[in-house]
Amino acid sequence: MTLSNALTIINREIQSIEYPQNPSGLYDPIAYLLSLKGKKIRPALTLLACNLYSGELNEAIPVALAWEIFHNFTLMHDDVMDKADLRRGHATVHKKWNENTAILSGDAMLILSYIYMAKSSPQHLKILLDLFSDTAAKICEGQQFDMEYEQQTFISENDYIEMIRLKTAVMLGACLKSGAIIGKANADDLQNLYEFGVSIGIAFQIKDDWLDVYGDPRIFGKKTGGDILCNKKTFLLVTALETAKNEDREALLYWLGNPSQSDEKINAIRTIYDKLSVKEKTQTVLQSYYQQAMSALEKVSVETAKKKVLEDIAGKLIEREY
């Protein structure tokens, strides 16, 4: 199975979801958000992991949908918390409707994700529900850390990595693990696929941070420097704050305390990053997590040719320019 095959299945199944007709104000926002173009990498990983062991995907498909619905639930609520206007180039749910709708429709999405997860066979149901619930709790923990760190000037690199592990990476690991559970993988393979997903998830987020500063706007699809303007904690900022000294530190703190939304602020902080070799340090850490992912994937006890699709996805996720 290729990534394209998996995405074709996922898109078809999302389009075929039947929502209750009433109240439309609850379900229309769900259908709207799920219809927006997105990578859909999480459900695809579920199908691909199952396919490593079994060509029978009937049980894996609703589980894959559960992950995609849950992921979009988190986005719906995140957009409210972040006061974001756009999601995938379209109005966020709370802008198209209102905040109360986004909160309640998000809650309904969470319930819907459990409904789909519960379609699993009795032999897999408990382990999958436990994995799903544990992952959901970790994502909430990561989001809470993210909000708390917004109020702190200094956090350690380890704190940042743990936050993105919880907020972003564990879901990739869990999507892979759930597919492999359905495919009846052994315990070692389950753990190695999970570690592969987590390491790629961390590398994916670090690459996002890097692109916001050093990406090509023509390819990136938007102006770079958005994270800088809102003082968002990124791997680059955390690294700079840990290493900057004397006048570099003073300049960095000055700009962090400056509410300017100008190119001057972006250029000034990017210049500090360049001076401190933050660009190179970020790439080094990103590659380290990529290598950890490849090491975990190598240990998975299926033939190399079958694992090539996961290897290719990992490479594309960290080499992407947008």
Image (cartoon, grey):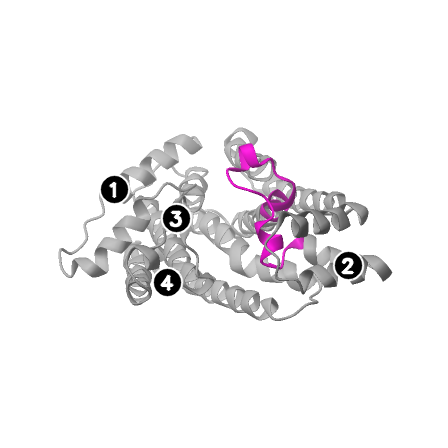
Q: Position of residue 295 (x, y in %)?
A: 65, 42
Q: Residues within 10 Å of mark 1 (few under 14, many from 20)?
A: few
Magenta-colored span = 207-235
Residue highlighted by disc 2: 251
Q: Report the Cα–Cα distance between label 3 and label 1.
A: 24 Å
For the residues labelled 1 and 4, the Cα–Cα distance comes to: 28 Å
> Which is nearer the N-term, disc 3 or disc 1?
1
Query: As displayed, is residue 25 above or below residue 262?
Result: below
Residue type beneath disc 3: Ile
Disc 4 packing (10 Å; few <14; some 14–19; many ≥20): few
The three-letter amino acid code for the residue at tag 4 is Lys
Q: Is residue 137 left or right of residue 146?
A: left
What label does residue 126 carry, if any? 4
**Who is closer to the viewer here, 176 or 111?**
111
Q: Residue at x 63, y 55 (%)?
A: 234
Q: Quadrant of the C terminus?
A: top right
Give how far apart the Cα atoms at labels 3 and 4 are.
12 Å
Mark 1 or 2, nearer chain start = 1
